[in-house]
Image: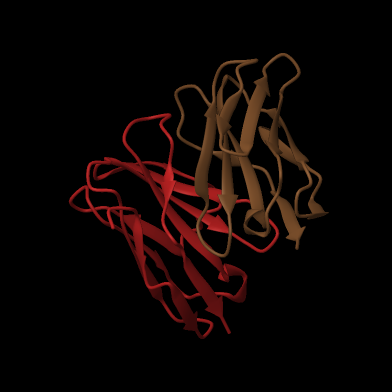
Amino acid sequence: EDKVVQSPLSLVVHEGDTVTLNCSYEVTNFRSLLWYKQEKKAPTFLFMLTSSGIEKKSGRLSSILDKKELFSILNITATQTGDSAIYLCAGIASGTYKYIFGTGTRLKVLA
Amino acid sequence: DTGVSQDPRHKITKRGQNVTFRCDPISEHNRLYWYRQTLGQGPEFLTYFQNEAQLEKSRLLSDRFSAERPKGSFSTLEIQRTEQGDSAMYLCASSLALGDTQYFGPGTRLTVL
């Protein structure tokens, strides 16, 4: 059965710290991996990764996919309290529409 | 705001009652998805529409659950004879094409007493 596993489950850091969130996946006919940020509402899209080894960046956030080792990381540099959220990753297989989500990493950034 | 909208945002009901939720996708998106999310878990896929056709239903969707998208625009999710285990956040998402990024609505939080 397809699955996505995230680690750590939760993380507490101080403002200014750099964090790395992990996502490993086992998805048949894997096509893409997505990262979402979820605060007290719906997930908001961060990145879609399809190619291995190509880093995607958006401000202080960056992510990369390793299709050989079947994992992705999400880096957040110079964390701010507004980064506090649950970070979800999801795998999607070719020709399907179902996102397989992990349980998320709950990040708390302390001032 | 041209994002995905859902209504209501919160619903409290008594066990055994029926509830219906509505989702309005992004206007040009012809693909619509329903997910359920419980505390501490990621969203779980429930069902998928391409235009008005319901193409997939998860086995999580018992016969008490039904979803429709009659005109290929908004969708409704109905839960009949609600149970306490139905308490969750029900999320709707839409996308332009298969495999495209899914954009989520704010969700409907259901509490069954």
The residue shown at (47%, 57%) is: B91
| B54 on left or right of B112 | left
User: Chain letter for brown?
Assistant: A
- Residue A109 visible: yes
Query: Looking at the image, is B76 positioned above or below residue B50?
Result: below
Display colour scheme:
by chain
Tell me which corner region of the image, top left, top right, bottom left or bottom right, holds residue B20. Answer: bottom left
Q: Residue B109 location, x and y as percent?
A: 51, 70
The residue shown at (30%, 51%) is: B25
**Foreground pick, A99 / B53:** A99
Please identify the residue farthest to the left as the structure is shown.
Answer: B71
Q: Residue B2 location, x and y as percent?
A: 27, 53
User: Chain letter for red?
Assistant: B
The residue shown at (51%, 86%) is: B14
Q: How many marks?
A: 0
Query: Looking at the image, is A13 positioned above or below residue B99?
Result: below
